[in-house]
Image (spheres, helix red, strand yellow):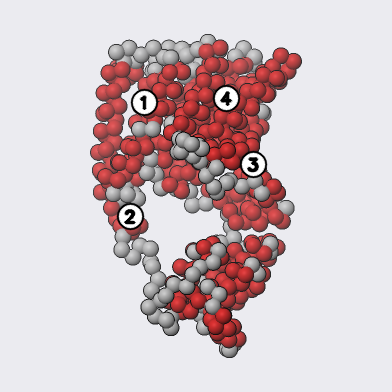
Amino acid sequence: MKVFQLLRKLSYSRSGLMKSCAVILGSGVLAAVLASWMFQGDRERLWGAGAEDWPVDERQRLYEHWYWDLERLLAGMEVIEDPEETSLEAFGRKVLAGDAAALAELDARVQSVSVPEKGVLFLQALHFMQQGEYGKAADFASLENTFHPHSIVRLLTVDALFRAGGFAELADLAEVPEYSDILRGGKMVRVAFKLGDLPLMFRHLLIAEYEGLQVSLLILALLTGGIWASILLHVYPTGGLKPVRVWVPVALLLGWMSTWPTVMALIWMEERFGFVQPTGKDFFEALLFHTLSVGVREELFKLLLFSPLLLVICRDRRRGELDALMLGAMTGLGFAIEENLGYFSAAMAGGISASRFVSATLLHAMLTGTAALALYRAVRNPGKWLADSVTVLAMVIGLHGVYNALLSAPIPGLGDMSYFYGAALAGAVHLFFREVRVQGGVHVRAISITGLFFWGYCVLICLEMAFSTLYYPLHEAISMVGETALTGVITAFVFLHALREPIGE
């Protein structure tokens, strides 16, 4: 109990919090040093000499280099002089630049023997891709793989069939063992959508999301959500959580599951209406997309998956509004945890978990909690609350859109103002804590919410520093995570100002 008393004392003291956070971060740096030494062999295998296994054979270079630059090649390329004019690479550049003599020679080389030399059919496939004749491109790439099997040739075959709309052929290829690794997960989700096979679509959605998931990244994702769950549930008065605590993990799970229909809706909007994320830097175009596409589908599906909990909340109305607010926030956290897995996997740590902890993870909890309360009120008393609830939902979707747009495009006349995402975050926090205060405000607890926030954030930073040393040298890992962690200052100010928790010196 003495330890618990010490933690309570530290959590309600500014100086105690600063000293304890310094101890946690110092321990984290030491842990990162130890992890850097332990991961040295793994890091050398990832980034050391020969790690990329760069091909030396010119035909292998043809496959590797030209396939990965396919989009640029399809847009047209100039002839680049090659020191060895007789090499296949030099010949291929001329073919793809539209050189008439090279094209004639290519046709002759394709037809001269029953088994063309390695790479020639692949070149012919690329040429037809340039011409927009994707069916022919798929045929020639498939022939190249028949005579000279290669994974990149199979990738080109799949890409050509996608462009040609050969989705039934792709479904058949997925059953062929050598294509099964390519045609699974994300690619097959879209194939299944085109074929109208929803069970197949859902199965490959789960494969895309969780196949090869690293346990370490799962721990980081669960920790980011778990810390916020612990913090937010402290809003309940002593004993107030007990009647609904069994539904907290259910809300988290429902939020996690809400990402699945969200992804399927994303594909539906792209394929049916061409509503894709803008590639340009027009702020208003980005704002429109992130509001009417991202904001609408994410907020509505989180709310839809939360709605079964209304049966539980409406049954016991003593703290119905507070329960709706908090279980809605837990649903938002569940969504954020699952979403974070994809971001963490793509970024290889380096500060992404610390960044998401103080931005999108909190944003999802605040927005969904506020929207869930609005839904509860509209269900209980539609005559009084329906108009207000629709307004709140519009504000939630709008804040989501503004937040994403600020991070994705510069504001006309002002340039990159991405650091103003905190304004959208502040709006979400204001909406949420406005309702918290209506429900009685923040209660004094054994451990302060402020302490939980800073201790949890410091622990997360420490773990990410250690994990980042798997991919980066020690000084880079500490620098990247540390710089990213400083962005938490905005969230700390916004959150703690809204919290208004009394903390002594």
Precedes in sequence: disc 2 or disc 3: 2
> Which image quadrant for residue 282?
top right
| Residue found at x 55% / y 63% | 75
Alpha carbon distance from label 2 to label 3: 37 Å
Alpha carbon distance from label 4 to label 2: 42 Å
Locate the N terminus and report the quarter of the image it occupies. top left
| Residue found at x 50% / y 12% | 441
Locate the C terminus and report the quarter of the image it occupies. top left
Alpha carbon distance from label 4 to label 3: 19 Å
Neighbour tally class for label 4: few under 14, some 14-19, many 20 plus, Cα within 10 Å = many
Label 3: which residue? Answer: 261
Precedes in sequence: disc 4 or disc 3: 3
- Relative height, residue 428 to residue 81 (above, below): above
Amino acid type, residue under disc 3 in the picture = Pro
Question: Helix, strand, or loop for circle 3?
Answer: helix
Expressed as whole percent of the image width and height from the top left, the position of residue 467 reads 35, 44
Label 4: which residue? Answer: 369
Precedes in sequence: disc 4 or disc 2: 2
